[in-house]
Image: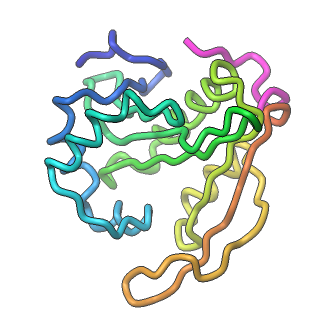
Amino acid sequence: MSKQSGLLMGEKVYLRPLNAEDAELYYHMFYGAETRRLTGTQKHLTKEQIAAYIEHKPGDDSSVLLLIALKENDEIIGDIAIQDMDRNNRTANLRIAIGEESHQGQGFGREALLLMLDYGFGILNLHRIELEVYTYNNRAAHVYESIGFVREGVRRQVLFYNHEYHDVVMMSMLENEYRERYPATKVK
């Protein structure tokens, strides 16, 4: 799939929906040890389970799951999701993962986050978008804070990973905070 099929377009990346043919790619992209550690992923899924997940995703109106692709070569480098949407309270959770370490620290995730925030506040009409980050993922926490997410608290020892417990930091951004910080941003 090419960038012409992108749902949200940035300068360096674009975001596009998952398709059935993405199952193999999706399976391999997130099985790196470092990606699994940073996301706290413990569950192991088969290719068949991932294919079934992708097949049923379009019927899920409580989430938007998109792949992150590089504009220069259409390479898929990660995924991003607004999930657990509560339409009554206009809230949702956000998550992101960049698969390869070589694609981390280059601003791709930051741009994808800003595209998805603009979509969440501008198209989905959300009021509050929240996320969680493990305390050992300092790079992600720094990016979230630099974008404008506010730390709200810590859930202690919520993740048991690699023989030890880890805390998670809860963060959020409100619609008015987003609009004050990014007044001219429009979804393309």
Please state if 153 lies on the left or on the right of 75 as rendered.
right
* Main secondary structure of the magenta stretch: loop
Point 75% across, 43% down: residue: 173
Residue 75 falls within the magenta-colored stretch: no
Please state if 88 lies on the left or on the right of 187 as rendered.
right
Q: How far across and down, in percent of the image, does residue 182 sit? A: 75, 26
Please state if 54 lies on the left or on the right of 135 as rendered.
left
The magenta region covers: 178-188
Q: How far across and down, in percent of the image, does residue 27 sit? A: 20, 49
Colour scheme in use? rainbow
Point 77% across, 53% down: residue: 150
Q: How far across and down, in percent of the image, does residue 85 sit? A: 61, 39
Q: Residue 14 occupies which quadrant of the picture?
A: top left
Residue sitting nearer the eye, 172 or 99: 172
Point 68% across, 20% down: residue: 122
- Work out whether 133 lies above or below 9: below
Residue 182 falls within the magenta-colored stretch: yes
- Work out whether 77 lies above or below 7: below
- Quadrant location, the N terminus: top left
Q: How far across and down, in percent of the image, does residue 170 sit? A: 69, 61
Residue sitting nearer the eye, 151 or 83: 83
- Quadrant location, the C terminus: top right
Q: Residue 65 occupies which quadrant of the picture?
A: top left
Point 54% across, 80% down: residue: 166
